[in-house]
Image (tube, rainbow, N blue to C red):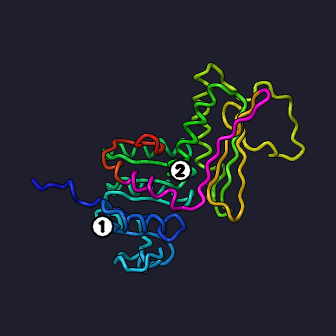
């Protein structure tokens, strides 16, 4: 039997001409354990993926507009998707149908969509990952915020992203809220801000969106930002702020590369990078 231990993982990048997609292309080309075999985008079709990403040297992988055809033609093992919330569910199901493992960085999934993906992976006997944030620092922020929520039950989330981000709040903020609620419930509480006074918004939305457990999330969208989040905790006479800043998209790439490798040995849907660290 042939030894496959040194074979590279065959990777397709969906959304390869976007800002995140270009970084993933560079990562797949540079990582000795990965092999870029396909690139998909609605823009720059037939152009060389490496040249579009700004690598400098051709990688001999042309950009296609047909995801399913590319996955089947290249016999891809992993497909990384950074596209748009409007198409990510369809893309993910197409990836699974092709017998490929999805690593999804696009956010904006509903609970029902997550269930559909989990069922599709189970039916195919594959593993897949949906990762709200690939930055190690962001994963640590979630962990620290969950722990703090066991002791401080007044908190709010502020997330800040570039003004081209399609969904609000961010997937990172939602995942953080989920973890914080777990921490709060572990302390025997079920609601943040239990001693807040009665509120009346004179401008609708001034208090942000409200997640389960009365946890407020505020979304900021401005040019010049990349991906930033802070969690504010308040108690009598004190404040605790936990903040993470991605000032460059390269901050996500070690996590993307790790997910591409770890997903090969997963079964079913894994939500969040923390499960493979």
Q: Position of residue 118 (x, y in %)?
A: 42, 42
Q: What residue did someone put label 1 on?
A: 74
Question: Horizontal placement of 266 versus 231: left or right?
Answer: left
What kind of element bears circle 2?
loop
72 or 37: nearer the viewer: 37
Question: Horizontal placement of 117 versus 229: left or right?
Answer: left
Toward the front, the furthest residue is: 237
Q: What residue did someone put label 2 on?
A: 133
Q: Residue at x 41, y 64 (%)?
A: 27
Quadrant where the C terminus lies? top left
Q: Position of residue 237 (x, y in %)?
A: 79, 29
Q: Position of residue 32 (x, y in %)?
A: 31, 63
Question: Horizontal placement of 200 versus 194: left or right?
Answer: right
Q: Residue at x 35, y 57 (%)?
A: 78
Q: Are circles 2 and 1 on residues that touch, CB within 8 Å? A: no
Q: Which residues are magenta?
A: 236-260
Instruction: Decide if residue 274 is in sight here.
Output: yes
Residue 56: quadrant of the picture: bottom left
The numbered disc on residue 44 is: none
Look at the picture and state if 262 lies above or below 148: below
Would you say residue 247 sits in the magenta stretch?
yes
* Mark positioned earlier in the residue sequence (2 or 1): 1
Camera-side mark, 2 or 1: 2
Look at the picture and state if 260 lies above or below 185: below
Toward the left, the furthest residue is: 1
Would you say residue 151 sits in the magenta stretch?
no
223 or 126: nearer the viewer: 223
What kind of element bears circle 1?
helix
Look at the picture and state if 113 lies above or below 185: below
Q: Residue at x 47, y 56 (%)?
A: 90
């Amino acid at each position: 039997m042939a030894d496959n231990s040194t074979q590279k993982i065959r990777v397709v990048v969906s959304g390869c001409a976007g800002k995140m997609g270009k970084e993933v292309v560079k990562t797949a080309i540079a990582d000795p354990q990965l092999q870029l075999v396909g690139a998909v985008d609605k823009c720059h079709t037939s152009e060389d993926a490496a040249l579009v990403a700004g690598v400098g040297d051709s990688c001999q992988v042309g950009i296609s507009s047909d995801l399913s055809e590319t996955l089947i033609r290249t016999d891809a093992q992993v497909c990384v998707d950074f596209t748009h919330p409007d198409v990510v569910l369809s893309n993910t199901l197409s990836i699974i149908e092709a017998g490929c493992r999805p690593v999804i960085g696009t956010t904006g999934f509903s609970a029902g969509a997550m269930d559909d993906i989990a069922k599709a992976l189970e039916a195919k006997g594959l593993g897949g990952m949906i990762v709200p944030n690939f930055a190690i620092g962001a994963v640590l922020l979630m962990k620290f915020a969950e722990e703090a929520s066991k002791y401080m039950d007044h908190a709010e989330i502020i997330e800040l992203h570039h003004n081209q981000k399609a969904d609000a709040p961010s997937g990172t903020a939602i995942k953080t809220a989920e973890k914080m609620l777990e921490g709060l419930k572990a302390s025997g509480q079920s609601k943040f801000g239990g001693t807040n006074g009665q509120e009346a918004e004179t401008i609708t939305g001034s208090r942000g969106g409200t997640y389960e457990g009365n946890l407020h999330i505020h979304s900021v969208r401005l040019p010049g930002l990349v991906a930033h989040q802070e969690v504010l905790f308040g108690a009598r006479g004190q404040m605790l702020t936990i903040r993470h800043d991605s000032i460059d998209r390269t901050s996500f790439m070690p996590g993307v590369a790790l997910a591409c490798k770890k997903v090969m040995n997963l079964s079913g849907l894994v939500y969040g990078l923390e499960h493979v660290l």
